[in-house]
Image (cartoon, rainbow, N blue to C red):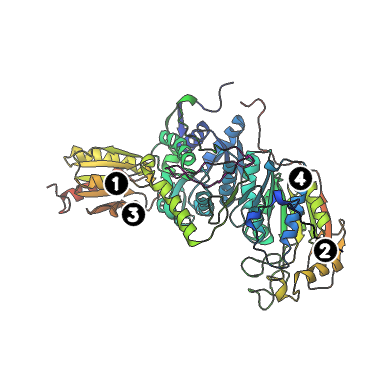
Amino acid sequence: MTTAVLVKEHPLDRLIRDDRMPHIWCPGCGIGIVMRCFAKAILESGIPEANHIVVSGIGCTGRVAGYMDLDSYHTTHGRPIPFATGLKLANPDLMVTVFSGDGDLSAIGGNHLIHAARRNVDLKIVCVNNFNYGMTGGQFGPTTPCGARSTTSPYGNAEQPFNLPYLLAAAGASFVSRWTTIHIRQIQEDILFTFNKPGFTFIEVLAPCPIGFGKSNNIPDGVTEMKLYRERCVVDPNVAMADLEIDLREERPIYVGRMVDRDLTPYRPVRLEGAS
Amino acid sequence: MADRRILTGQHFMNGDHACAEGALAAGCRFFAGYPITPSTEVAERLSLRMPEVEGVYIQMEDELASMAAILGASSAGLRSMTATSGPGFSLMMENIGLGVMMEIPCVVVNIQRGSPSTGLPTAPGQSDVMQARWGSHGDYEIVAYAPESPQEIFDLTVHCFNVADRYRTPALLMSDEVVGHMVERVIIPTLDEIPIWERKRPSKSPNGPFKPFEALDPDLVPPMAYAGEGHHIHISGLTHDERGYPDLTPENHHRLVTRLVNKINKNADDLIKTEEQYLDDARIVVISFGATARSARRAVVEARQEGIPAGFLRLISLWPFPESLIREIARDADAFVVAEMNLGQMAHEVQRHVSQPVEGVFHAGGAMMRPGPILETIREVSTSDNGRTR
């Protein structure tokens, strides 16, 4: 006979603002999985919680800043990276994570993304890619596969999507990896790894958005997309960057793994010897 | 090594450089910007000087990023500034609104040029003064100052930092190409002589509950906690409650926006700055600001030499607008003359508060306005039916 065991605390309670629950995310959404990995990595990091800062932009993933019980900034659409750049340079002791979505970071914030990578500012980026603008109800964006349907591409998306790891590798990031929401251990390990990796780091996590993206593209629920990831994901850090393109609707591999891990000099403001 | 934080002494420098030195004297230690004429010398000077004081100079990819970066740096506790001109000022509007909503102190310098659009990159204008007031979306109040000389750019840059910190607001320094590029004597005082208004900070320890938007004082300004102090603050551009949590109800939205507006309006007396000359017997009141004020003052002096009872009011603060003062002056005035390097932006604001005729001396910009056209308008007003002086 089984007995119910009631616990008063969840190990992640201290990092979650439970007075903000329930959250706004839809059934089947993958953002919460990534947030949990982030919270666990923070607990394991050994870095005082007060030093962990989360900066988000606008969109579903942008709401992470409001749910983490850390000093957190929910900024304007596309601008979390420059806001975080100011925070980090003003107080280099802070561990600043930018947690936001593919639309926020690579569409409206795309210029900031590549320039922060080029400068190699010491920021930790977690980019949840759900292939569409979810918050506004499922429009196509810069990561939407060509041909995919959305509320603003009813005849199929006419644009080519970004291959984000390729973009970030070319822009100069110190670390680039890609996982999906079935890779919870790897996500957590990589977030923890990047806390100790100086410079601009970028982790892309492919995540289901059944309400915004899936419903129009024959992926009816989150579980179906998770199964799709399990069937098609191939861990191959040495894959050619160009092959990191994704089309969920085609029977082809989705390559994941750590694509870039290199030691580059992180950005430091100019200092003079002997300055007062 | 001499104290590089402040270059105490007499200098012969342009307004842009004086702005940079004012920022450093005020303790600004973070500058993010994007080169744009005619403000570039502010950035150039700070790229040279920030490393001397262990401050940060960072050149961002655009003005959207520059504005966001100074809000981030200020949130970590540094006095922060950016400098730009019209086209960049337009891009900054988005995050000036974020600064208002998040109540983050910062200073935005606009060395105005002829506009709209690319306009006159190397020539002056004063046509961003209404954008300064209304440019970001939504209801808000802003503070903006208009210097007329390199010395005053120095002084008002310091003042902008103080106002920004005291009221937790972006403060705008609305200069123009004439003053920015004008070279004059600038006297930089000692560090002790620089007035510093501190930011209001939490009195509670980081262990106690702290509500980052709880404004209990009559000035309606909540204390500001910095990132990394352990207060677990959430700061959002969404309509939020006193805890910083999103609360999108109409009641809360009205309460928040009203407080943000009243925070400036109810402290207007502390923010407004004007210069008044010859107003005691003035029947014709000439109003101007920035570079144009120099010509307007000259025109008033010459008019008085001709026996015309003209007086002079210089707007040092554009926003908040000194409306009570102008209504008071209007009690004994027959007419107003407003001289500005735009097609009537502040004249319209003056007209809102007085019943007398407001005659404009307007030019779309491109060159310093001379005293002649202003004097001519004063003469015309003094002989017309509206000017009852004859």
SS category of the residue bearing label 4 = helix
* Residue B93 screen position, x and y as percent: 50, 53
Q: Residues within 10 Å of mark 4 (few under 14, many from 20)?
A: many
Q: Is residue B202 above or below residue A12?
A: above
Left or right: residue B118 versus residue B333 is: right
Q: Please, what is the dominant secondary structure of the magenta stretch?
A: loop
Left or right: residue A110 versus residue B315 is: right
Q: CA distance from mark 1 to mark 4?
A: 56 Å
Q: List the residue tagged with mark 3.
A: B344
Q: Residues within 10 Å of mark 2 (few under 14, many from 20)?
A: few
Q: Amino acid at mark 1?
A: Ser
Q: List the residue tagged with mark 4.
A: A195
Chain containing mark 3: B
First in sequence: mark 3 or mark 1? 1
Q: Which label sits on residue B324? A: 1
Q: CA distance from mark 3 to mark 4?
A: 55 Å
Q: Amino acid at mark 4?
A: Phe
**Is residue A211 found inside the magenta-colored segment of the image?**
no
Q: Amino acid at mark 2?
A: Asp
- Answer yes or no: are tags 1 and 4 on the same subunit: no
Please report the residue visible at 70 percent of the width from the left and 43 percent of the height from the top: A49
Q: List the residue tagged with mark 2.
A: A243
Which marked residue is nearer to the observer: mark 4 or mark 2?
4
Chain containing mark 4: A
Q: CA distance from mark 3 to mark 1?
A: 20 Å
In depth, the one of B206 and A246 nearer the eye is: B206
First in sequence: mark 4 or mark 2? 4
Q: CA distance from mark 2 to mark 3?
A: 59 Å
Residue B370: image quadrant is top left
